[in-house]
Amino acid sequence: MTEAAEPNPNRLTQELAIFHDVAKALTSSLDLDSILQTIMEKMAEYFRPDNWSLLMVDEERDDLYFAIAVGKASEALKNVRMKVGEGIAGHVAKHGERLIVPDVYTDPRFTKRIDEMTRWETRSIICIPLRSRTRVLGVIQLVNVDMKHFGDAEIYFLQSVCDYAAIAIENARAVAKIQELTITDDCTGLFNARHLYKTLETEVYRSARFGYEFTVVFIDLDHFKQVNDTHGHLIGSKLLAEIGYLVKAQLRLIDYAFRYGGDEFVVLLPQTGKDQALVVAKRLRDSLRTSMFCREEGLNLNVRASMGVATYPHDAKTPHDIIRQADEMMYLVKNTSRDNIGIAQRGVMK
């Protein structure tokens, strides 16, 4: 590695322009992918490597995956994963310190596995960690940079850009967490009532545009107050969480489950007519009938529910009206037999 003796005015101008573009991307967008893409493009423009990539740390699996890979070997890297500690990038992820290796074949940490998979020849590697305050979030890797012009000024510049990338990742994760908290019910992990109406508005618009039906199932637990009165609110909350999990487990990936409030739940079934929705409602009713809850606490509680079903556009055409129709059908069941299903325009299921 050589030290830059005199600052290059053109290089300084380029650095300032890149900092400006990266800062602009950070402040004008919350889309992490587009911010990181801008950062990686600017870095490549400056250093001109043969290949460059952003590897993100998957903390659950304790490995790294290629979130962005650009260059001749990029396609082959899409499904490649490396263990934290494996190779030069893995070492950087594990220890959180940058590594600049002008000749990889003189470094025992280098692994040939990736080159063999991509049929690429790595000669030099520059790896910089993306650090938050407590951990390494990822690694930016530049392969086969011209090392003759890579000195302290370039290292400083590269580290600064990597710091921007780390800020972008932390910000995006914080925003995602806040958004998740605002639409999720703490007790059950299902979506909350606020998110229900937003989702219904979107579904009404989409269904009107494409001529789809959708159905809402309103669920109210029978005699839930007795559980709270007999066993206390902690058991009541545990029961709600277990029922929320049961409801979610009965649905497709495109379906939605919400905790409406108290012991009330709402299921939204997109692109689903009334007869198909009744199959789901019966499945939910039968699952509740045969399930025992709070087993870990030694209680083996069995809880039933009154349900109401309404379909767009046949029963109602607005979010509030569709909920009102399903709610009314649920109350029809609640005030008669309980443990059954009420169907808009059809009455209680026989």
Image (tube, rainbow, N blue to C red):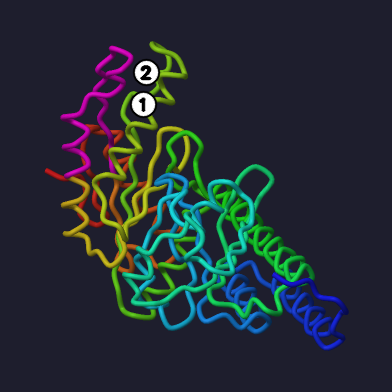
Seen at 59% across and 67% down, the residue is 126
Q: Position of residue 49 (x, y in %)?
A: 57, 80
Query: Does residue 249 appear left or right of residue 76 in this picture?
Result: left
- Counting labels gives 2
Query: Are there few (<14), some (14-19), or many (20+) residues within 10 Å of tag 1?
Result: many
Residue closer to the observer: 310 or 271: 271
Furthest residue to the front? 106
Residue at mark 2: 227
Q: CA distance from mark 2 to mark 1?
A: 9 Å
Q: Position of residue 264 (x, y in %)?
A: 40, 38
Picture quarter with the N terminus:
bottom right
Residue type highlighted by circle 2: Val
Residue closer to the observer: 331 or 291: 291
> Which quadrant would residue 140 be assigned to in this image?
bottom right
Query: Are there few (<14), some (14-19), or many (20+) residues within 10 Å of tag 2?
Result: some
Q: Is residue 306 located in the magenta-colored stretch of the structure?
A: yes
Start-end of magenta stretch: 283-307
> Which quadrant would residue 150 be assigned to in this image?
bottom right
Residue type highlighted by circle 1: Leu
Secondary element under disc 1, as helix, strand or loop, is helix
Residue at mark 1: 239
Q: Position of residue 102 (x, y in %)?
A: 59, 69
